[in-house]
């Protein structure tokens, strides 16, 4: 009888661990509900080459931001070097939002997060295409 309870307890522990592991690996999309109509204006600062570009295609920016997936907070981005693309967004309600694409990180209002590679890279490439225009 005790053996049966031990197997049941072990099975429950395994199920709990698997559930925790599956949920901890899931990302969240902080901008999934961001609509172009919520953005009054936007600009991007690319460094290097230290250029600031006004963004006129707000819908395109919103589409890229909608795809961003973040995982856990991580401030180790401060130990990396490379190009950053910082988007400064003024929303129609007057709030400012700062989003920096710095693969493998996205920095939102000063808080760094590990992120899914592809959407962040797409956001970075979008900023560099704006520079080339």
Image: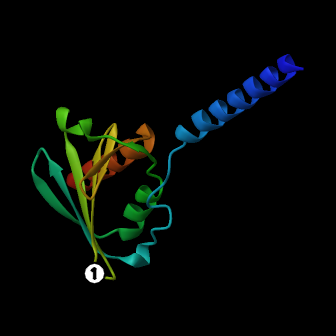
Quadrant housing residue 54: bottom left
- Left or right: 87 as drawn, with respect to 18: left
Q: In this view, does 110 lie above or below 35?
A: above
Q: Position of residue 73 (x, y in %)?
A: 35, 44
Q: Where is residue 113 in the image (x, y as percent from the top left)?
A: 35, 45
Residue depicted at x 46% and y 72%? 35
Q: Where is residue 40 in the image (x, y as percent from the top left)?
A: 31, 78
Q: Where's the C terminus, which quadrant?
A: bottom left
> Disc 1 on helix, strand or loop?
loop
Q: Using the image as rendered, state which of residue 53 and residue 118 is in the foreground.
A: 118
Q: Using the image as rendered, state which of residue 86 and residue 4 is in the foreground.
A: 4
Residue depicted at x 84% and y 17%? 3
Q: Position of residue 33 (x, y in %)?
A: 50, 67
- Left or right: 89 as drawn, with respect to 61: left
**Residue furthest left in the image:** 50
**Residue furthest right in the image:** 1
Q: Using the image as rendered, state which of residue 10 and residue 52 is in the foreground.
A: 10
Quadrant housing residue 120: top left
Report whether residue 81 is seen: no
Q: Using the image as rendered, state which of residue 101 and residue 46 is in the foreground.
A: 101
**Residue furthest front in the image:** 2
- Residue of label 1: 94
Q: Count every numbered label the image shows and give the total.
A: 1
């Amino acid at each position: 009888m005790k053996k049966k309870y031990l197997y049941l307890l072990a099975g429950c522990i395994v199920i709990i661990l698997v559930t925790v592991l599956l949920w901890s690996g899931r990302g969240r999309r902080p901008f999934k509900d961001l609509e172009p109509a919520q953005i009054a204006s936007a600009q991007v600062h690319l460094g290097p080459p230290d250029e600031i570009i006004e963004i006129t295609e707000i819908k395109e920016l919103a589409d890229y931001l909608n795809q961003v997936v973040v995982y856990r907070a991580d401030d180790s981005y401060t130990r990396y070097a490379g190009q950053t693309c910082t988007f400064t967004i003024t929303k129609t309600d007057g709030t400012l939002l700062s989003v920096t694409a710095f693969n493998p990180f996205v920095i939102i209002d000063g808080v760094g997060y590990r992120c899914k590679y592809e959407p962040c890279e797409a956001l970075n490439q979008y900023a560099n295409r704006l520079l080339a225009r």
